[in-house]
Structure formats: structure tokens, C-alpha cells
Image (tube, rainbow, N blue to C red):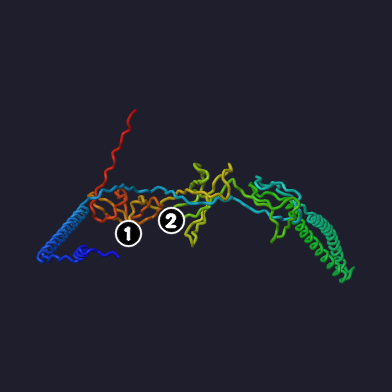
Amino acid sequence: MNKMPADQAFFDEKAHEKKPEKPVNESGRRKIAALLGIGVVVVVAGLVAFGAKSQSDRHADAIATLEAQKNAVPVVRVMAVKEISGPRTIELPGNMAAFDQATLFARATGYIATRNVDIGSKVKKGDVLAVIAAPDLDAQLAQARGQLEQFKASVLQAQANADLGKVTDQRTSRLVQQGWSSAQQGDQDRLTAASSSAALAVARANVVAQEAAVNRLTQLTGFEQVVAPFDGVITSRLIDVGSLVTADAASGTSLFSIQRTDVLRVQVWVPQAAYFGIKDGDHAAVTVPELPGRTFDGVVARNARSLGPGTRTLLAEVDVDNKDGELTAGLYGILHLQVQRQSPTISIPSQAVIFNKDGLLAAVVDDEGKVQLRKLNVEYDNGADVEVRDGLKGGDKVILSPPATVSDGMQVKIQEPPPKTEAKSG
């Protein structure tokens, strides 16, 4: 085993010995700490001073801004309003209906022998639409006519018996007076004559009753031909050749539906605000969304003269000429009515109306440039414009889109209109 030299071991032991530490200078350390504290205080004081200065500047700027806003005179746009006394146009939705429409039912029981029309067929009043074959009804009519002839013959027979009884009674009464005949025979001949007269009255009554029955059956057989009650268009057909139809009053067979469309009724519900301004005979115009650019003239023909209790609206009908057939029943249209104003009103755009806790107001600029807030009594509002009954008068300058800070007595400046540019000549 190798042994380490003695010199080498001596040097290693020296190397492991700790070197003595230098003593610390306490006074220097205190000086350094004092300097650091002073620096921190200086920095903090500088930051506080800077923040205070910034806060003071911002406060001063805010006060200056508020003062400037307070002293600033806003520039506003105005319009001079005018009184309106002419009629007002209102637009209301309306539904077009046929002037006349009917569903035709069978009045004779039988089979359809002939059908002359179909849906869409244009017919005239009196045209035969279908023919019903009713042999039972024809037989009843023939039988009734035969009985009528029998009753008429019975009348002749009864007339003859009555005449004979009358003559016999006259002859017997003279013989009784002369004593050539007994009183019993006279009474018998007198009563026989009265009985013959009564039988004649019964025979005549039977003739009248049978004539009524014949007339009834004649009219029913006339219903074997189904005819158009007015000029129009067939809108539905519910039978075909060979169909069995019945003439029962409760469950009779419906045959056709017909509508008169040369004149259309446009039904519209007029609000209460326009009730006193509309009357029969007023002109009206109708437009249809699917026919842009087209206007159809009409006349207010009739109205219900009573407002609905639930809606406070008036049902009115406008008649529209449709001889060319461009319109049809069931269409939806817009009705343009001219409603007479009961008193003059002031019209202003909706952008000039102020709504706050005091209700509806308008800001008016007087001759001195000060604002006057006027409370409005609105008569009509269509969304774009508002008609005012009270609160404004003709010539008032109303502010358009007034600022949110507008107040009564506020000073404003009216914006001058832009100069008109003249067109350059070529």
C-alpha cells in the first residue's frame, strides 16, 4: 500500500484550515441604511406631489369643461309649423268581398240530368246552370191537375143542383101560400135549396185549394231548372251529372256557389279618431301590394253607423268598380281614405316630440332665442308625423331632435340653413 509523503500531508492540512474573517464596519452600514431611507422618502414624496398635481390639473380641467358646457349656447335646427285644415289621408287594411254571393240548393228531388257550367264559368242572370230530372214530381203535378179538373166538374154539378133547389123552393113556396102544397113540403124544398148552395160553396173552395196545390207543384217543377240569380262567376260546383239531390229544407243538397264580382265591396274597420270625418259618398282609393303602381278608385257606400264595443272601430264598405275583372274577391288591399278634420291641427315630425315625466312636449324657440317647452295635446300619430290639437300655433319654431339637456328658458342658437348652390350652366 502506497504511503503519502509527509510534505504533501502537511500542505493539505494547511489548506483545510479556515482563514480568519475581517471585522465588519458597523458605522458604514448605518450610513448606507440612512441614505437608502432618505432616498425612499424623497421618491415617495415626489410621487405624492406628482399625483396631487395631476389630480389638481384634472379637477381644474373638469371644472373648466363644465363651465364651458354651462356657458356654451347649443346650435339647434328648427322648423316653422303651419296649421292644417284640409282632409287627412289615412291608410287602413281592407278585405275585398263579392258584392253579391249565394249558394244554390236543390228545390226539387231527383237526379242531375244536365250540367251546363263549371267553376270559373261566367254566367248571366237567368242562365240555366243545371237540369234536375224529377219524374216523381212531374207525376204529382199531373195528378194534381187531374184532381183540379174533377173539382171544377164538381163545381158545375153543385151549381146545377143549387139552381134546381132554388127554383123548386120558389115554386113550392107559392103553392104553400095558395094551399096547394103542405108546409112540410115547403120546408123540405127550402132546406134542400140551402144545402145545394152550401155544396156549391164547398166545391168552389176545393177548386181554390187544388189550384194552390197545382201552382205549388208547378213552381217546384220549375226548380228542375237551376238558374243563375244574378250575373256572376261560378266559384264552386258540388254536383255532377247523375248526382242524386234532395230538396229537404234542412239538409238540402248544395249545387253551386256564385259571386258577383263586377263590383267589389272593400270592408275596412275605421278607428274612432276618424269616425266623425268619414261619410257615405266620400272618395277612396285602393292599392294592392301585388299590383305596384296601380290605384283603383272607389266610393264609401255604406257603414254600420255604430262602433264595436271591443275595438271602438266602425265597419265601412267601399264599392270598387271591377268591370274589367282585374281584381277578385278575397284579395287584401290598402284603403286610402280622405278624412275631414273637425278643427285645424299642427303637424310636426316625430323627431320634434319630447317624452318625459311631464308627458309629450315640444321645444319652441322664441324671438329672443330662448326655449319654451310646450305640452302637446295629440290628435293623431302615424309614427312619422304627429298632429297636435293644442300646445302649438302656426308660425312657432319647433326644435328638431332637441338635445337631451334642453330645458325651459335655455338659450339656443338657430342653425342657419346651408346656402343654395346654383346649377352651373353648361
Q: Position of residue 211 (x, y in %)?
A: 77, 57
Q: Nearer the viewer, mark 1 or mark 2?
A: 1
Q: Nearer the viewer, residue 324 or 218?
A: 324
Q: Is residue 129 above or below residue 309?
A: above
Q: Residue at x 34, y 28 (%)?
A: 426
Q: Position of residue 215 (x, y in %)?
A: 75, 55
Residue 249: name its quadrant: bottom right
Q: Is residue 398 left or right of residue 205?
A: left
Q: Position of residue 275 (x, y in %)?
A: 45, 55
> Which numbered circle lies on residue 18?
none
Mark sitting earlier along the chain (1/2): 2
Q: Do the CB atoms of the residues marked 1 and 2 lie less than 8 Å apart?
A: no
Q: Is residue 364 left or right of residue 254?
A: left
> Which numbered circle lies on residue 273?
2
Q: Nearer the viewer, residue 335 or 50?
A: 50
Q: Is residue 184 above or below residue 63?
A: below
Q: Residue at x 29, y 41 (%)?
A: 418
Give the SS element for disc 1: strand
The three-letter code of the residue at mark 1 reads Asn
| Total residue callouts | 2
Q: Residues within 10 Å of mark 2 (few under 14, many from 20)?
A: few
> Which numbered circle lies on residue 356?
1
The three-letter code of the residue at mark 2 reads Ala
Quarter of the figure that contains the N terminus: bottom left
* Residue sitting at the far left: 27
Q: Position of residue 181 (x, y in %)?
A: 89, 69
Q: Is residue 15 left or right of residue 77?
A: left
Q: Is residue 294 left or right of residue 199?
A: left
Q: Is residue 426 above or below residue 129?
A: above
Give the SS element for disc 2: helix
**Distance between the alpha carbons at the discs numbered 1 and 2:** 25 Å
